[in-house]
Amino acid sequence: MADPVDTAALTAWVGEFARLVHEQRDELTALDAAIGDADHGANLDRGLTAAVSALDAEPPADPAAALKTVATTLIRTVGGASGPLYGTFFLRAAGALGGVTDPTHHGTALAAAFRAGYDGVVARGKAEPGDKTMLDALGPACDALDRALADGEPLDEALRAAARAAADGRDATVPMVARKGRASYLGERSAGHQDPGATSAALLVQAAATALTGRG
Amino acid sequence: MKKLINDPADVVVDALRGMAAAHPELRVDSDNRVVLRGDAPVRGKVGLVSGGGSGHEPMHAGFVGPGMLDAACAGEVFTSPVPDQVVAATRGVDGGAGVLHIVKNYTGDVMNFEMAAELVAAESDTEVVAVVTDDDVAVQDSLYTAGRRGVGVTVLVEKLAGAAAEEGRPLAEVAEVARRVNAAGRSMGMALTSCTVPAAGRPTFDLPEDEMEIGIGIHGEPGRRRVPLAPAREIAEMLVEPVLADLDFTGGDGVIAFVNGMGATPLLELYLMYAEVAAVLEKAGVGIARTLVGSYMTSLDMAGCSVTLLEADDELLRLWDAPVRTPALRWGA
């Protein structure tokens, strides 16, 4: 069984994320049309397609290089807020993976990478939990991952718990009033709509649960 | 929705190809999707770079030329440009006197321009100053939100700071003009219809025949509230009153009054709206020093308009009257 944070596994994670976004591109765009500007699905799909091509064209040397390629490709191709935000997530996650040498600690390494990515998004976007953003899916996912690993759960189970927490966090954005990003311009009218950023972020965690489990 | 396009994915590239063909006096870097003055970089002059999502034409590329912008970066439709584009534009207009970034206050635009400025600082000693426009009174300003949107005043900032740069003034002064214009300008917009993003293929929101949206931005996002359609004179009040409530325009040397079309509203209606806006201003005791009427900052094919008022003074009026030679704004030159 391969190591869940090896280069192939992380490449598979990004590939699965790209597949999910492509499949749900129209749904993401429809959510964005309701409270934003109707481009989240198209932009993220374009960026992730480019990221998958970049990984394919030049296979990365190590796990950190893989995520760094994804980060720079997203920053270069997506634009808007989601380009810098997802780019920063992968860039910081890559930084956290850079020091991983002991494969027996892959669970905590992955959790640290997720946490570093989350912190990066907080710093770049200056948003907080409850602002109706991607943080509302990513934050609960990081917490669930940490908690499950601390409880001694196997990584497979911890990632599934993280995916469930992300989905719950995504659903919890529905009644929120947006305080950051384009949805914030609607004020109270943003309530009653699921946040597109939290929706794509839940796909990111779901992709991890699918691609990084069953590997050992 | 019918569109004059080849493929929704190629809209921006194809339009830039057209700009290059129609305006040989400009230089179009199609790899980076940057439109530059043909003579950029102008030695010793502060370079002005703006940019944003496409779909707001003529803003920004239509304002590239002597007396206004040195370069404009075109993002995807309603999506800010990426840092690489802004870096390429900044390098392309750096004539040794520094570069001013004019950024509309949207989360994505601000982040991408910030990342670009960091990259430029890491790779060169070009001095970059950014001024963020945020003039939309429809959005409540607060520490806890993304803040007000940059809308109509951006056009005025680009004209006035562009004129200051053309006079050979240093970066700090050009930036100060831009900040001063932003601080003294306020806008409010409304929509009669939604717009259709080419990649989405259908209107962003549905608006019944007898209703309108008040407090819209420029990305097809719904406004603050939806109200029954009203005569133009009442719409003028709905737009001007919140602007006047936000800033006192009764002093000074009068205002620059800008009635902007959102893309699908004919000039006939815009002039009709201007008459109503002027009447509201007269009643409020606000003098009008200069006017601009037309579709300069659009939201694709949205029908509707916005009103921007800028409190002017002698210096700003002189900069306003200074020659400008761009595809969309051209006088005195």
Image (cartoon, coloured by chain):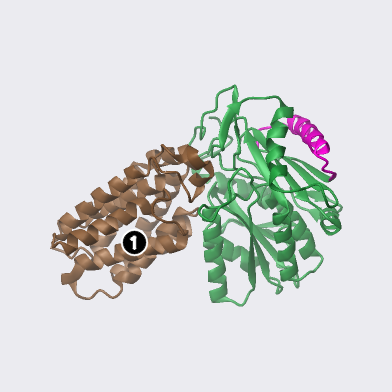
Chain colours: A brown, B green
Position of B211 with respect to A170 (left or right) is right
Position of B281 with respect to B12 (left or right) is right
Position of B108 with respect to A207 (left or right) is right
Question: x, y percentage for residue A59?
Answer: 31, 65
Q: Identify the residue shown where x is 23% and y is 65%.
A: A5
Question: x, y percentage for residue A91?
Answer: 38, 66
Residue occupied by mark 1: A55
Q: Is residue A213 visible?
A: no
The chain ID associated with circle 1 is: A
Q: Is residue B120 visible?
A: yes
Q: Identify the residue shown where x is 21% and y is 60%.
A: A147
Q: Is residue A43 above or below residue B163?
A: above
Asked if the magenta segment contains residue B264, the reply would be yes
Q: Is residue A61 above or below residue B241?
A: below
Question: x, y percentage for residue A10?
Answer: 27, 61
Q: Is residue B15 above or below residue B43?
A: above
Q: Identify the residue shown where x is 36% and y is 61%.
A: A118
Q: Residues within 10 Å of mark 1 (few under 14, many from 20)?
A: some
Find the magenta span and give its range. B263-288
Quadrant containing the C terminus of chain B in the rendered view = bottom right
The single residue placed furthest to the top in the displayed view is: B210
SS for dot 1: helix
